[in-house]
């Protein structure tokens, strides 16, 4: 009987040992299989991720209503699924971001949407001014040069004041004299276009000879008259002033030649000369 119990105990021990070995082997196999699967998934992700990142298209970073001038900060490259890629989208490496700068939005674009050729119009394209003009406004062109046009630093979308410099004859006869003055005749005028050109071969810039402005009908009539009266100059306004509310009626700003030159002021100052009982006013 003792031998039987000893045999059973030995058999039980062997079974337990076999069970433990099988359990450990199964666990190690399962662990190895799971690790292999994870490595395969990670490798697949690493292979597919660069392909997704490599496909980028040009989108707008903020809402651009119709008539808005496109600025560099409003354009950015964004990753885009290749299966959702449309032929009209601008793909990085095939299209240039610079080609859309200073263009005008023809149809409003929402932030995050791709920018396409059909939704913008460029300076020089047919319909450019019509797309830019605010309803009810008019476009007029004024002559400028390197000085009156602020050395080429005026661009579409900027806002300017118009300054008229002209001469006028005061009084008649011996007291007749020529006076010069400059005055700000129009304020906060939007620039639609300038004819400045850049040579992309040697980097030379041709200073603009004209500037096209957005005005009301009355202002267009005024500018037509001002160009005949004297010399027009543009004065660039700060972008920060776009959000500043100014009074509707503002005192007209002007400057006489005698205010900037003491010689002129002294030359035109009247002096009373007394000879006996007679007095005469003489200008020096």
Image (tube, rainbow, N blue to C red):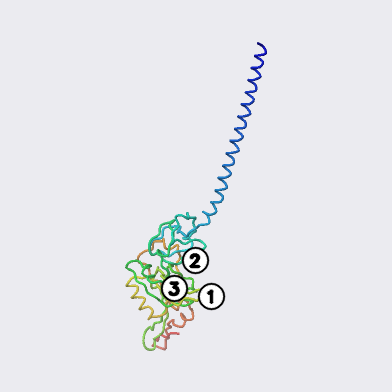
Q: CA distance from mark 3 to mark 1?
A: 16 Å
**Height in image: 37 above or below 193?**
above
Q: Check if mark 2's residue and mark 1's residue have beta carbons within 8 Å.
A: no
Relative to 77, say whether 42 is above or below. above
- Sequence-wise, which precedes: disc 2 or disc 3? 2
Mark 2 falls on what kind of element?
Answer: helix
Q: Which residue matches tag 2? A: 98
Q: Quadrant of residue 254?
A: bottom left
Q: Earlier in the sequence, mark 2 or mark 1?
A: 2
Mark on residue 71? Answer: none
Residue 204, label in figure: 1
Element assignment for label 1 = loop
Labels 2 and 3 touching (C-beta < 8 A): no
Camera-nearest label, 3 or 1: 1
Camera-nearest residue between 99 and 186: 99
Q: Residues within 10 Å of mark 1 (few under 14, many from 20)?
A: few
- Residue 194 badge: 3
| C-alpha span from label 2 to label 3 | 18 Å
| Residue at (46% x, 54% y) in the render | 83
Residue at position x 66%, y 19% in the image = 10
């Amino acid at each position: 009987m003792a031998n039987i119990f000893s045999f059973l105990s030995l058999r039980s021990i062997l079974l337990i040992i076999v069970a433990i070995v099988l359990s450990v082997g199964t666990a190690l196999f399962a662990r190895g299989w799971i690790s292999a699967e994870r490595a395969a998934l990670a490798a697949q992700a690493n292979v597919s991720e660069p392909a997704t990142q490599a496909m980028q298209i040009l989108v707008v970073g903020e809402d651009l209503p119709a008539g808005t001038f496109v600025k560099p900060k409003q354009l950015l490259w964004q990753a885009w699924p290749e299966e959702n890629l449309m032929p009209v989208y601008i793909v990085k490496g095939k299209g240039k971001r610079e080609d859309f700068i200073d263009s005008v939005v023809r149809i409003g674009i929402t932030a995050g949407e791709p920018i396409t050729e059909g939704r913008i119009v460029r300076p020089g394209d047919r319909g450019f001014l019509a797309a830019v003009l605010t309803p009810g406004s008019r476009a007029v062109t004024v002559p400028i040069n390197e000085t009156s046009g602020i050395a080429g630093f005026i661009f579409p979308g900027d806002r300017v004041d118009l300054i008229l410099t002209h001469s006028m004859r005061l009084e008649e006869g011996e007291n007749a004299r020529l006076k010069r003055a400059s005055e700000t005749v129009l304020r906060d005028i939007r620039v639609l276009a300038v004819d400045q050109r850049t040579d992309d071969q040697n980097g030379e810039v041709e200073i603009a000879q004209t500037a096209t402005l957005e005005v009301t009908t009355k202002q267009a009539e005024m500018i037509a008259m001002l160009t005949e009266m004297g010399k027009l100059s543009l004065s660039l306004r700060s972008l920060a002033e776009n959000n500043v509310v100014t009074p509707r009626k503002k005192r007209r700003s002007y400057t006489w030649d005698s205010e900037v030159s003491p010689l002129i002021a002294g030359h035109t100052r009247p002096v009373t000369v007394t000879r006996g009982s007679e007095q005469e006013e003489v200008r020096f």
